[in-house]
């Protein structure tokens, strides 16, 4: 009779043991998080989409395919679906509450831009949106990312932001406090797909890590790469600065997956529910 409780305990433990490292690292299914969905074994990689956009699919532990889904901040908690080779897979999204941040800017144009600056902002936003929507077939070199810069985390992802008392878009990335000129390194291998000096972002670099997984680094003081460069993991791509809408030197790092801006802390093992 003593064997029965032991068998039950072993059975309950099996799902946790069956999860691979990538699933344990990334599966944070909340708005602004990541859902990892088991697609089972197959000879070839399944084709999966979420909200009409292709998904990152990898072979985990050589046993099964998993889809890694970026969940935008706008997604509602509850049931969501992905499409896999014509079939629907459902998964659950939990809730998450994000804090507020209030910032005072001396330059009112960075809060309420004039018509000329608004046109520039719209043009730059369209350019960056096209970059976020790129999907290359390459497999990411690593999904446990390196920190792109040495320095403590400052403003976290998802903050509801108020500039001079006016609410604006939530904080779409993760900030690192670092001195001007600190080297910024690629957290994974990738190709440089966009460079710019933007109204809000300042000097900016976009790196495509593969299959819709894209990093954006902004407020740089210097850019040390060229468009189309292939960067190995750890390559220096620029230096920390305070260009664009910034109150002081820091690195703002965005991670986008299937065109959803998600919490970069997930990829460096620093996620706080």
Image: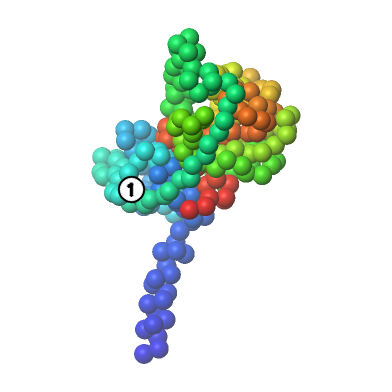
Please provide percent x and percent y for residue 135. Answer: 44, 29
The residue shown at (43%, 42%) is: 32
The residue shown at (63%, 39%) is: 176
Q: Quadrant of the N terminus?
A: bottom left
Mark 1, secondary structure of its residue: loop
As drawn, which residue projects farthest toward the bottom? 1
The residue shown at (56%, 19%) is: 198
Please provide percent x and percent y for residue 141. Answer: 57, 39
Q: Is residue 113 left or right of residue 184?
A: left
As drawn, which residue projects farthest toward the front? 165
Tally the marks. 1
As drawn, which residue projects farthest toward the left? 87
User: Which scheme is used to colour this image of the protein?
Assistant: rainbow
Q: Is residue 71 left or right of residue 210?
A: left
Q: Residues within 10 Å of mark 1 (few under 14, many from 20)?
A: some
Please provide percent x and percent y for residue 27. Answer: 45, 51
User: Nearest the camera: 267 or 113?
Assistant: 113
Q: Is residue 4 above or below residue 232?
A: below
Q: Quadrant of residue 49?
A: top left
Report whether residue 50 is seen: yes
The residue shown at (29%, 49%) is: 79
Q: Is residue 76 above or below residue 63?
A: above
Report whether residue 208 is seen: no
User: Nearest the camera: 117 or 235?
Assistant: 117
Q: Quadrant of residue 53?
A: top left
Q: Which residue is mark 1?
A: 77
User: Nearest the camera: 226 or 180?
Assistant: 180
């Amino acid at each position: 009779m003593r064997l029965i409780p032991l068998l039950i305990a072993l059975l309950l433990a099996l799902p946790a043991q069956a999860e691979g490292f990538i699933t344990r690292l990334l599966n944070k299914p909340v708005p602004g998080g990541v859902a990892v969905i088991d697609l089972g074994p197959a000879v070839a990689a399944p084709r999966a989409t979420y909200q009409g956009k292709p998904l990152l699919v990898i072979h985990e532990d050589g046993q099964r395919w998993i889809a890694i889904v970026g969940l935008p901040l706008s997604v509602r908690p509850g049931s969501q679906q992905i499409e896999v080779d014509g079939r629907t897979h459902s998964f659950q999204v939990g809730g998450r509450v994000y804090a507020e941040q209030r910032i005072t800017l001396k330059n009112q144009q960075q809060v309420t831009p004039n018509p000329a600056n608004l046109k520039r902002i719209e043009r730059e936003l369209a350019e960056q949106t096209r970059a976020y929507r790129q999907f290359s077939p390459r497999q990411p070199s690593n999904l446990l990312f390196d920190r792109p810069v040495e320095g403590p985390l400052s403003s976290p992802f998802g903050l509801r932001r108020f500039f001079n008392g006016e609410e604006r878009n939530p904080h779409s990335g993760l900030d690192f406090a670092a001195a001007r000129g600190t080297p910024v390194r690629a957290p994974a291998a990738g190709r440089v797909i966009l460079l710019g000096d933007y109204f809000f972002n300042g000097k900016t670099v976009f790196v495509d890590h593969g299959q819709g997984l894209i990093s954006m680094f902004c407020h740089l003081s210097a850019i040390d790469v060229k468009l189309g460069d292939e960067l190995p993991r750890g390559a220096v791509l620029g230096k920390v600065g305070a260009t664009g809408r910034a109150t002081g030197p820091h690195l703002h790092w965005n991670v986008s997956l299937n065109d959803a801006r998600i919490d970069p802390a997930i990829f460096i093992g620093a996620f706080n529910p």
